[in-house]
Amino acid sequence: MNSRPEGAGARACWFVGATYGGTDDQTPRFLQEGIWENGYQDKYLDAVKSIQVGDRIAIKSSYTRKHDLPFDNRGQTVSVMAVKAIGTVKENLGDGRTLKVNWKPFDPPREWYFYTNRSTVWRVLPGDWTTDALIGFTFEEKAQDINRFRNAPYWRERFGDSAVDKRRFNWTRFYEAVADKLLAFRNRRDELIAGIHAIAEKVDCMSILNDQYQEKVPGGPLKDICPFTAMGIFNRGITDANRKIIASELANLLGVSEPVPNSFEGIPVLNNQRTWFFGYSYKRQPDDIDILWEVFAQAIAFAESDDAEARSAFVSAYDNATQRYGVGWNLTMGLYWIRPWNFPTLDGQSQRYISKKLNIQIGMNGPKGRCNATDYLAVLDTLEARFQEDAYPVHSFPELSLAAWLFKDSGTSAHPNATDPDAQDDEADATPEAEVTAAPIEPYSVDDILTDGCFIAREKLEKILERLRTKKNLILQGPPGTGKTWLAKRLAFALMGQRDDSKVRAVQFHPNLSYEDFIRGWRPVGDGKLTLVDGPFVEMMKAAAKDPTSRHVVVIEEINRGNPAQIFGEMLTLLEVDKRTPNEALELSYKRSDGERVFIPDNLYVIGTMNIADRSLALVDLALRRRFAFIDLEPTLGKPWHDWVQSQCGIDSEILVEIEKRLIALNSEISADTGLGPQFRVGHSYVTPPFGIPISDAREWFRQVVDTEIGPLLDEYWFDALEKSQKARERLLEGF
């Protein structure tokens, strides 16, 4: 293969806004004057300075819509981006503000759905199917494959083709409808609180909300209420049956027509000692409840808009609310209730899952060591970006909350009750705690791997699994698209005998990853101080040691992209099967105490993946090779692939036969190329729809795969002989 530096040829495209801080749309002026201007004095300056002459640029406007869409949106809000004009940068004045551009307007603007961005200056790099599709739509006027976006992991639960009975988060419709109706009561709170008191008098499972006007002196019924507390009356530690009763009564009061959920699985609930979002009368300020209504309204506006000003208004309202007595972590729970697809909950269980399972740091720079708005939105933005990765453990905030609910961490409950540690802020009521029900065990075996869409023979799968059991360290290697990461996680489940994400930790190696990141190192904690923090591998060692009857697995993606010897350090020795005993324990480079020695538990397994086509990487360290069993994965088409894709995705057999024939011919050509070889063949994953998504137009789907996935890969292979790549594309698509 002809090599070039990573990222070479990946030229950025730019999507920019034309309104700033409530100004009129500047697009007509920009088109007339042949310019684009950054209307902010202190934002996006560095980004604008980095734009190069020759870069492609588009003026966009982002918003949301529920109606008049060219697809069934199931009543959900859809992100929309209107492309008003495209152009090429001919001069950058270097002041972070002004570009000269050759513009081409669109009248009317062209609308793009789902994959949008709120930022006024959005840098988009090719190389991912989503970005490639956006660039093709914008600058090459290609049609958007809406069905592919609808059924992609990030959007599938809301907009995909799954049957109604297969959709996991139907409850979100009810919660959003309750929030919408509550907003209409912002200036009718006397009516709202009277109605809630009437519910308490009517049903046995709810008590009257009693306020205190003086400390330790009985008061009377609460006279005012915020919207989060109103929703909290059925989101607390009581039985599901009682939650349904109260939710139904509240729905009747508000005029909500959406059905009450049959299950509240994975929805965080309030600690029964903390069911209000504000303090008793003698402790709260006169405007405390008003401020909670404001953050409620701004959160809904922010969720329904891609406007930067809406984001700014939400930040202000959020930070104002967190300054008030009684408003703690529960605020994030309330935000999740009102717009589950837009806001994460940071209840205690979710915090543990995000930090320990997803390895995302949660900033705590707000009052009492909680999140301020910047911290909260940083987590939100990071998660939303990761959700769009096919291999990420979760793909939406509801899925994250459910995963956190099921997550088992030593010393914690599997239920998100008792979420806020700041009990001193809270006044208790007499409602009893709910019982905690353990999450059900979902068995998993080699049969399930095959059912999920693995095309490897059962005998080989069983041998791979046996090698993992005996060697404890395994690397799956193969060409691009052979399903290495996909298989790694399922082998982990089969090894454990159950589908349990809490016992699997995924880490991706890269050139900048260090021992301090992976094993243990010093981290700043503020005030110029450092603290010793365990990395994900040591965390999994401790989890395995505390649960010796269960198997735990660390999945390392692209293990050869880092420096394994440097990243593992002394752990490289401890990985050996016969070194996994206390007698072989070693000191770490960073010790917590004198004499501290560690060993890798016998029930901790490691599965790595390695793309053997990546020659930009150094050869795998020989010491690592001695400690791992290596399994070669091949492009696997044939009858198992054919039958699975036909049955699960509904693609005609004749089309599949033709796709298989053409891919085999392409791989033969790649294998015979002296600059490439068999390790650069195109894997079957490219022509296997994810998760068995039904394909309505198989020919168009294959054309899209070639145009946006296989074609760019071939361009990379033959970057100095693009005519060869083009001919290969044409042969793949001939007759399609």
Image (cartoon, grey):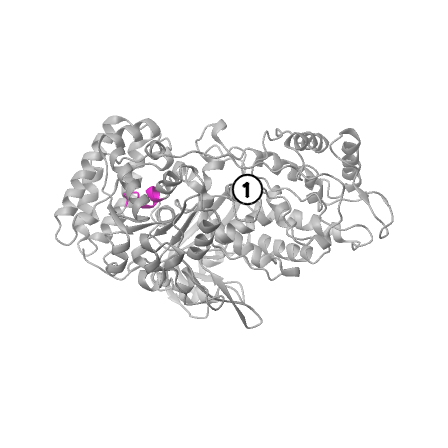
Element type where label 1 sits in the image: helix
The region drawn magenta spans 481-488
Judge from the rendering whether residue 40 lies leftward or rightward of residue 12; answer left or right: right
Does residue 481 sit above or below 8 in this rendering? above
* Residue in view at x 38 percent, y 38 percent: 148
Instruction: Find residue 517 and report its horizontal and vertical position in percent.
Output: 42, 62
Give whichever of 406, 542 is nearer the camera.
542
Identify the main secondary structure in magenta.
Answer: helix
Quadrant of the snapshot with the C terminus:
top left
Instruction: Find residue 263 and report its horizontal and vertical position in percent.
Output: 58, 31
Quadrant of the snapshot with the N terminus:
bottom left
Circle 1 residues within 10 Å: few <14, some 14–19, many ≥20: many
Asked if residue 685 shows in the view, the reply is: yes
- Examine the structure image and report whether residue 605 is included in the region drawn in magenta: no
Residue type at mark 1? Trp
Asked if residue 24 shows in the view, the reply is: no
Give whichever of 542, 119 is nearer the camera.
542
Residue that label 1 marks: 405
